[in-house]
Amino acid sequence: EATLDLAERRRIRSAIRELQRQELEQDEETLASKRFRPERSSHRQDDKENWPQSRHLEEEQQAALAALSEQLKAITSVEELTKLLRAAGEYEERKLIRAAIRKLRAEEIE
């Protein structure tokens, strides 16, 4: 509806601004409560049954990476390392192989 009374228009605009301000404050409070929500103490606490198994798998993976690292030290050909890189499935394995390739190339340059 249209009104010609300027005082009434001011009251309406003021009420609209107040509603918008309240809505913004509510949105900010909602965001703040989500942003600073206390984190769970540990993701492992959620899955206590699988924790020993996952810890065992992690230890196995670390042992396998250590063995791979020793194997890579013995390889002196970039071509062999490239073949290993293409055959590797895990990210950490590829990371180690790429590092070995970079090291060999740096030694060749020197």
Image (tube, rainbow, N blue to C red):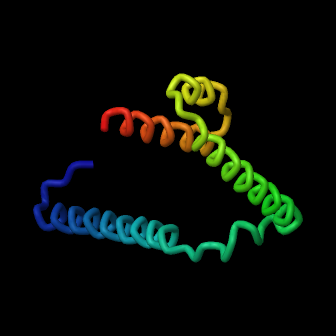
The residue at the point 68 percent across, 72 percent down is 42
Q: Is residue 84 left or right of residue 105?
A: right
Q: Nearer the viewer, residue 15 or 27?
A: 27
Q: Say which of 36 and 43 sits in front.
A: 43
Q: Where does residue 74 sit, x and y in percent of width and height?
A: 60, 40
Which of the 4 image quadrants contains residue 37? Answer: bottom right
- What residue is shown at x 31% (from left), y 38% (from top)? 110
63 or 89: which is nearer to us?
A: 63
**Residue 36 drawn at (x, y percent):** 49, 74
Choose top left, top right, bottom left or bottom right for residue 108. top left
Looking at the image, is 48 positioned above or below residue 90? below
Judge whether 43 appears above or below 41 on screen: above
Q: Position of residue 2 (x, y in %)?
A: 21, 49
Give residue 82's quadrant in the image: top right
In the drawing, does residue 32 fall left or right of residue 97? Answer: left
- Residue at 74% x, 57% y is 58
Hey, which residue is sitting farthest left in the picture? 6
Which of 16/106 is in front?
Answer: 106
Viewed as shown, does residue 68 lie left or right of 10?
right
Vertical comparison of 109 with 46: above or below? above
User: How many marks are shown on the rendered structure?
Assistant: 0
